[in-house]
Every structure is written in structure tokens, then in C-alpha cells.
Amino acid sequence: MDRRTLLRLAGAGATVGGLSACGIASHDGIVVDGTGPAPIGGASGTPARRPTWGVGLEAKAVIRDFFYQPAGDDGPEQARARCRAYLGGEIAPTWKPGNEITVIWLDQEQFDVAIPTSNGDSTVVRIEFYPLGRLTAKGLTPLPTTQLITADVWVTPRTPNGNDNVITKIEYKSGSTADVKNTMLLSSFALSQLYDYRALYFFSATATKELVPDARYVYKAPDTPSHRKAIELLAAGPSDWLAGIVAQPLEMKLKDTPTTDGGKIVVNLSQFDVKEPELFDPLVAQLSWTLLPEVKTITTRDTSPVQIKVESVVKADAGKPYKSYNAAATRHPANRLFAVADGKVRRIRIGEALDPKVTFLDETIPNQNQGIEWAACLASKNAPEDIGALAVVRIEGNRPKLIIYPRTDSSSEPRQIRFRSTPDKILRPVFVDRENLLAVADGKLFHVRTTIDANPDQISIPSISDPITAYALSPERRRLAVVTSDGLFVVALSRELEGDKISAAGVRRVPTVPSNLTGVGFTGESWLVVAGFHRGNAGIMEISLDGGVIGRSGGQTWLKYQGFPSITSLMAYPDNPDPERGAGIGRVVYTANNSAYETQTISLSADVIGPKPEGRVINPFFLE
């Protein structure tokens, strides 16, 4: 077999919120047969600013623009007034929504191809959308379920034979409307265009002083800069689901809007109840990360341009280091890719020949690199290009065993993790750090200590009782994404310094358009990628951490596979939030149709992955 380097775009221009897809050369050098992924969605012709009603709008434009009107920071009455400008006829006197705004995902694919029909003076357009959640100051509050709603929207001229079109009737045809009828509706695309989706940062409740991100939506108001609003939201405290694992911020109040002065971002506080000078250093770090969109316009270096004043008196000058407070910023680049193929752990070297000695298992421990179904690798502290610790799920006698290799030098000894009851199925393990591992056995989450001979401790997750079928750990290792038959959830993880115990605290459901999810991963601090099904096709979609925005680029596109039974394995490597090291794009590898793929903006040049695995799938993964 010709062991040449292969590369193939699986779909020209296909994107997952800015990610394109390419094939990873499989076992025998043949990339996946059959139809490749194609881009779905998009929002061509949609305005980047909140539109206003005007004469001459055709029916679809009226409907599209109507779903922009709730956006703003001027209160519900003004939002209702903007919406009413698009209404007339029989709906005008009966449309009486409350103060709540429901974010919906308007199916752009269906909307683009929908053919308007005439009914008297009216034009009728059928729309399909998914209600996602309520927009609040602390992000999106999910609705109990995410179900497709179909409606006929009637658009009629205000004056006979005129071109002053307005919405005169909405007829719901299918789906539960209890959560949408008495609220204002804001499209997910309008949310992505009119709001800054940005992270606030709160310190963990432990003494380690690690920052945990908390994503919010800040309206792009010309009279209230986003950075001022971000600090005000920070002072108001964390989201409810994170409140149990982070510390409340110190009480502070802005004296005026932060300004840029001589390469510094000056934050002037009128109220700050702290006298100890050493407490200003963590605050500088917290504000620097919260103001990262503004910080990186001045510098990408390790020292912060943030200067803190209290009543116009300098308390902490610019130039303090801040990046080390965010564990996600210390991660190495995602350029080490592995796969389980032919029951062995194999390394894929980009643009190089396949290394026959791909792991220490082949070099020092006979017969250990075989029968493997899943694996996780942790980078060495001293040599981040190399494996420092390894965990594998090996099938022996038709039963899975979790084997840990805490060290990968000549003194390495494998240790089998013994659960209190022998599991029938173990998913891919995930390293929290060198001493701690997360594992899912028979659908239950466990905390495994890699260096201590002890049974794993089960981690009970509040309000989640269904078996876990997929999961992923956030880049700072304090949040967990979990998939069950009931959908997608994010879980806050509590770390106790005493005994290093890991437990689950708050939980939030994440609405998703795809159903029957088969995989999840973090592509960034505040972004997830999910694999599932939509309209009968397997696909991959990137979403915000609360599910309110689809596609990081705002294009609302994703990868769709026609004819593929499912995406059976998915892992993501998140982009680095460090403005000096990150590119704003996560890498995603996955298995579909028994071959491996990657999605990113630049295609992957990959070598043949060992011998043909005799029908077994290839499960790719990253060195963590």
C-alpha cells in the first residue's frame, strides 16, 4: 500500500461556525467513501444592525426584521413599541406580550426556500423555529424543552393595494406554543449580531485563585460601551449555576466609564471596600480577562494595560501580569493528534511520516498497546510534545477495563482501576490533571485518582438521572458538558482542597437544535460543539455555552452528512483565550462512517494510520 500523505476536503467551504471539514487519511490511505459534509443554514441578506420598519419591505423581510425588534437595553416598553410597528390588522389589538424575550432559532434553510402564497390581499409565509430560552442579564435561561414550532405568518398592506406591509396574523400549525405566545421573539441570529457575546471572569471559591468564565450577552449600545456594561455585570455576580463554585466579586462600583489613556485602560471606581494592596493584583487580572476584547486592542503581552483608581486615586498601575490566573491560557497548542486504530494508540504526525513508535506502550511494555477502544493522553510537564500520563479503556474478555499509566518513563507501571461493580461499558476517560481523572462507566460519572490505589468515587449530578452517553471537560477544568437521552447539560465542578474531592454543583440545561446527540466538546471557553441529528441527517454544530447562538462567526451554518448513520466519536481541542497564542478557532476531530475527520479552517495533511483495522472504527483524540 502506498503510504503517502493524503488530504481531502470533505466539503468545499463547509463550516461549523467558521470551521471547515477535511478527511483524516484512514487505515489504508482511503478517505471516507460516500457523500461528504455540506454547509447548512446561513443568513444571507440579514442586517447587522437592528432594522426599522419602512414602506416597501417584502413579506419575508418584514418577518425577518420583526424578530430583531426586542433587542436593546432600553427596557421592555420600548421593545414592545418597536415590535408593534410591524403589526397591524387583527393581531395588533390582541398582541399583548409581557416583559420576557424568548430567543428562537429560525430555520434559515427552510425560510430561504419557503414560497410565499397569496390569500386575498395577504401574503402567507410558513416559518419553522425552535424556542431556545429567555434572554436575561445572566445569559439564556433555557425552556423546559426545545421543540420545533411551525407557523403561518400573514403579511398584509396597511392600506389597500399599498406596499406598507405589516404582520396581520400568526397561525400556529404545530408544536407547543405555551412558551412563546405571550413573549417577544428574538432570533438567534439577531442576538449574535446585536449583542457582544463575551465572558466575565470570577475566581473559584477555593484558595487556588483560578478564574472561571461566565458568558453573557451585552447589547451593542452606542451610548453605553460594552466594557462598562461588562464590569457592571461582573459586580452583579455570577450566573446561578456557577454560584456554588466561584466567589462573589468584591463590592465595587464604577465612578465613570473606563477610558483609554496613554496605552492604559483606566478603571475608576467610586466604591471599593478593600484596603490591602495585595488584593488589587487579583482584581487587575479579573478585570483584564473580563475586558479582554478591549485589552487586546492595546497589547497581547503578558502584562495588563488595566490601571485601577478609587475616587481618581491610582491604586494599581498598569503593567501587572494577568494571564497566569486563567488556566485555559496555559494550555499548549493543539498540534498533537492521536487515534485509536486497529486496537492500538497511534500518533498522527501532521506532514510527516508515520512514527512506528508512537507511544511508550510500544517501547517499554510488551503487549500493552492492543485491544484498546478509547484513550486519553496528558502532556508531559517538562516536554509538552510528549505523553506524560495515559489512560486507556482496554477490552479483555468482552469487558472493558480502565488502565492508568501515571508515568511514561521506564519506571511506569500500569494500574487497573477497580470499580465497586464491574462495568459493562466505559467511555473515553478525561484527565482533570495529573492526579485526577473523570470516567463514565455504565452511564455514571466517576472521579478517579490516578496515583492512589482507591476505588473511583461516583459523582452525583443534581437533576440528572439518565445515563451519560457523552461528556467533555472545559479548558480550565471547572465545568463539564454532559449528554444524556434528555439532552445537553453543563455542570459546575467543585474542587475541595482537602482530599482533592471533585463534586457536582450547579447544573444548567443547554437547548440544542440537533436531537439524539452523540458527542460534545469545548471549542472555546464559552463555545461547545455537538454532534447529533437534524431532519434525519447526522451533523455537527457549534453553539454558545447556553445554546443561544449557533455558529461562532454568526453565519449559523453547520456540517451535515447525508446517508451517514451517525457520528460515533467526537473530541474538540479548545482555542486558547490568550490573545498572543489563540486563533479564535477550536479543532474538532470525529468519527463518521468508520473513518476519521477533522474540522478547522486549514485542511489537515495526515499520514496513513497504520494497517487496516478490519472494519473497526478510528477514534481520533488530542494530547491534552
Image: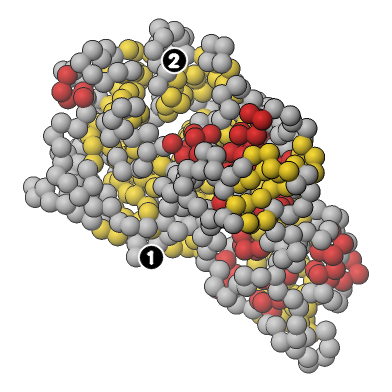
Mark closer to the chain start, 1 or 2: 1
Kindly identify the residue that appears in the image at 56 percent across and 16 percent down.
Answer: 497
Q: Does residue 29 lie above or below 236 as drawn?
A: below
Q: Does residue 321 lie above or below 81 as drawn?
A: above
Residue 459 image-quadrant placement: top right
The amino acid beneath tag 2 is: Arg
Discs 1, 2 touching: Cβ within 8 Å: no
Task: Determine the residue located farthest toward the right in the rendered image.
Answer: 93
Kindly identify the residue that appears in the image at 43 percent across and 49 percent down.
Answer: 580
The answer to which of 504 and 515 lies nearer the viewer is 504
Residue 620 visible from this viewpoint: yes
Q: Percent position (x, y) of residue 39?
A: 44, 63
Please give the residue where the numbered disc 2 appears in the rendered image.
449
Labelled disc at residue 13:
1
Kindly identify the residue that appears in the image at 51 percent across and 43 percent down.
Answer: 303
Crowdedness near tag 2: few (<14), some (14–19) or many (≥20) residues, C-alpha within 10 Å: many
The amino acid beneath tag 1 is: Gly
- Which structural element holds mark 1? loop
Residue 315 image-quadrant placement: top right
Q: Percent position (x, y) of residue 332?
A: 37, 38
Q: Percent position (x, y) of residue 551?
A: 52, 56
Q: Does residue 601 lie above or below 82 as drawn?
A: above
Real-space Cα distance between discs 1 and 2? 44 Å
Looking at the figure, which quarter contains the C terminus?
top left
Labelled disc at residue 474:
none
